[in-house]
Amino acid sequence: MFDFFSFFNRIFGGTREDTRSAARDRLRLVLVSDRATVAPHLMESLRNELIEVISRYMEIDTRSMQMGLERHEGAMALAANIPVRSVHRSSAEMAAVSLSPPPTARRNPDPEVESLEVPAASRPAEAPGRLDNSRLAARRRTRRHKRRA
Amino acid sequence: MGKVVVITSGKGGVGKTTCTANLGAGLALNGHSVLLVDGDIGLRNLDLVMGLENRIVFDLVDVVEKKCRTFRQALIKDKRFENLHLLPAAQSRDKDAVSPEQMQALCAELKESFDFVLIDSPAGIEHGFRNAVAGADEAIVVTNPEVSAIRDADRIVGLLEAQEKSNPRLVINRYKQDMARRGQMLSIQDVKEILGIELLGIVPEDEGILSASNKGQPAVMDRVSRAGEAYRQIVARLVDPSSPPVGMPTTDSWMDRLRRVFTVSVGSSGVH
Ligand SMILES: Nc1ncnc2c1ncn2[C@@H]1O[C@H](COP(=O)(O)OP(=O)(O)OP(=O)(O)O)[C@@H](O)[C@H]1O
Ligand SMILES: [Mg+2]
């Protein structure tokens, strides 16, 4: 039998939900954490390389450093909380001559340790290659460091 | 020397066995010599879908345990194509009756004698999966355009890459074009982007698949079946990678719609 209701609904309706984009967005998010968790050595080697790079500029407390994927509303973020003990004077001078003024950074109220938080954009808009979803964003901002006992 | 292709998915029930049967029959139709291996030990099914269930004497485990003289003794010859054979799974054994090393050795031997050895993998990522992929040169990942099937497919792709089974190719099965058009199902493009592997084919949802398995006669042999047509295209691409790239399934012609209206009205009036 001809279904008039669904016919009119289809012509005039548009009340039907677009579940496709929900499926796509949820899948993208869940696959970021899936891929990272099934490959523990991925996070491990990312951590080690991060330490290596940052150590060229500053002395950091690698033992209380925290890093992991976090969900922020509609995106996954690579969140790293890295206590900074001191900045190498030489690298500070070098940065001052070679770079335009650094992005404004809020002072950390904690007098002992300053912390560097590196949020990462989750999925870039274009289709990414495998295993590189948690690319570090170029954008950096400082954030309050949560001390752990 | 031929090649060994495993058909796998992660999630169960997405259409691996159906795909294996259709690709096997399709390749045989094109004149290639084909061996189908049912890798789903304990849940034998490929024999039934192929309509070859009545003639099983020995099985995969018997071959591995050397209970028969050669693997040839365990093969079931297809009635329709003389170049198509099936090596059935054991029904009363566990998946760990066979090891990945044994499968590797067996596959190396089998591909000496056939153009294509297609292995129907069980669902899951455990022992049965590792057995099925151990001896494979290539992998086909079957999925449905649905979140859980795609998540599991992604896991499988990761595992295949870890085992250096490079460039697995994707078959999207049970695609419903009208739902996708209304934005109620993931599009082909979405699935392709999310999984990031080469698309080998798209098989539409087709009731003919059920009647085909009822009869034990793969849909690829049915000239008018839409799923059968999709499988014929996949076969062409398997044989010749330069054959036309996968397009969207052709939209229904008004004849198709008319035919469907007739089928519906005949069905609803109770005439068979
Ligand atoms: N394109 C299709 N259209 C309609 N039904 C389909 C299609 N493909 C498969 N099916 C149906 O889906 C069901 C599962 O298919 P099949 O047994 O091939 O899946 P499988 O992946 O081998 O399952 P398992 O993981 O249990 O081995 C069957 O009933 C089959 O008829
Ligand atoms: Mg199966």
Image (cartoon, grey):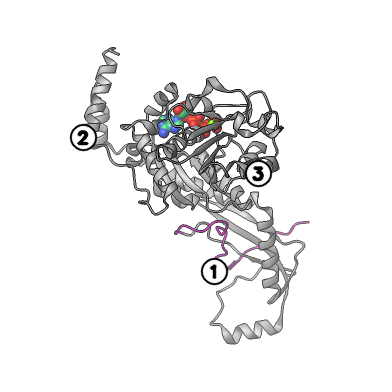
Q: Residue at x 56, y 62 (%)?
A: A135
Residue under label 2: B254
Confirm whether circles 3 and 1 share one chain: no
- Tell me: B97 left or right of B15: right
Residue B238 on image: x %, y %: 44, 47
Q: To which chain does the residue with label 2 belong?
A: B
The stretch of residues the image draws in magenta is A125-149
Q: Nearer the viewer, mark 1 or mark 2?
A: 2
Q: Is residue B15 visible?
A: no
Q: Which mark is residue A62?
A: none
Q: Earlier in the sequence, mark 2 or mark 3?
A: 3
- Tell me: A149 left or right of B72: right
Q: Which mark is residue B104?
A: 3
**Dominant secondary structure of the magenta stretch?**
loop
Residue A25 on image: x %, y %: 47, 48
Q: Residue at x 58, y 26 (%)?
A: B44
Q: Nearer the viewer, mark 3 or mark 1?
A: 3
Residue under label 1: A138
Q: Is residue B42 visible?
A: yes
Residue B232, above or below B218:
below
CB under 8 Å between discs 2 and 3: no
Asked if residue A135 lies in the magenta stretch, the reply is yes
Q: Classify residue B92 by image quadrant.
A: top right
SS at badge 1: loop
